[in-house]
Amino acid sequence: MPRNHDSLTARRISPAIWVNDTHSGLNRTAVSRVPEPRTVVDVARVVRRSRSEGRPLAVAGGRHAMGGQQFLSGGTMLDMRRLKRVRGFDDERGLLEVEAGIQWPDVIRAYLTRPGGMYSPWGIRQKQTGADRLTIGGAVAANIHGRGLTAPPFIGDLESLEPIGGLERGTCDCSAG
């Protein structure tokens, strides 16, 4: 009589969701779920749920970390790419306020697109690391340096961060020494 492998386990395991990094493709990892929050409230909800279930949580965006750091076998992979809005632009200072999941091409479009086709005097000092679909959140997390190896790391170009925890919110003044 053939064995039913499901009967050999204490509980039925959900089908795996397979994820991988964009560049090397060497980090194929099975995760349990991949929520795609659209708001800060959604992010907090996922964090709280993972915490209450005792389930590990990893955060991913463009999936460019070639070491697979954005994946956690069997855990929840929080996909930040839907948090991609431009929340504000200070045209006088050239400062963008964006969400963590926005990718570089959208950041560039945000400061170049001016009302009535007006010219924008602003630009980005550093070219990212050769991959255009990086998220800002991932760039901050990895403190990328880009192609300008004589330029300071990416974090030096940030004015502030607004971290979001499971229940609390705060700000970080990145310009403070």
Image (tube, rainbow, N blue to C red):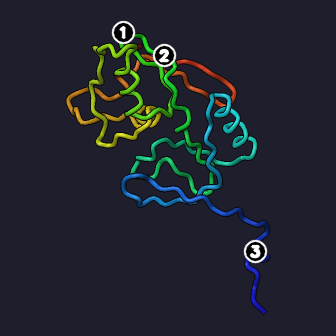
Mark 1 or mark 2, which is nearer the start of the sequence? 2
**Mark 3 element type:** helix
- Crowd band around label 3 with a 10 angstrom C-alpha radius: few (<14), some (14–19), many (20+): few
**Residue 15 against residue 37 in the figure, above or below:** below
Q: Residue 53 at what x, y percent from top left?
A: 75, 46
Residue 93 — which label?
A: 1
Q: Position of residue 86 (x, y in %)?
A: 49, 23
Q: Nearer the viewer, residue 58 or 128?
A: 128
- Amino acid type at circle 1 is Arg
Residue 90 rendering spot, x and y as whole percentages: 42, 10
User: Of the residues under marks 3 and 2, which one precedes in the sequence?
Assistant: 3
Residue 95 place in picture, x, y as percent: 40, 15
Regarding mark 1 in the picture, which secondary structure is present there? loop
From the viewer's perspective, is 146 left or right of 86?
A: left
The C terminus - image quarter = top left
Residue 68 appears in the rendering: yes
The residue to which callout 3 is attached is 6
Residue 62 position by quadrant: top left
Seen in the picture, residue 21 relative to 78 is either above or below; the reply is below
C-alpha span from label 1 to label 3: 61 Å
Between the residue at mark 2 and the residue at mark 1, the CA separation in whole angstroms equals 12 Å
Q: Which of the two discs, 1 and 3, sits closer to the camera?
A: 1
At horizontal 66% and vertical 24% (from top left) the residue drawn is: 168
Which amino acid is tagged 2?
Gly
Asked whether 150 or 18 is in front, the reply is: 18
Q: Label 2 belongs to which residue?
A: 88
Q: Is residue 49 above or below residue 92?
A: below
Question: Is any part of residue 177 visible from this angle?
Answer: no
SS category of the residue bearing label 2: strand
- Category of crowding for the residue at label 1, using alpha-carbon neighbours closer than 10 angstroms: few (below 14), some (14–19), many (at least 20): few
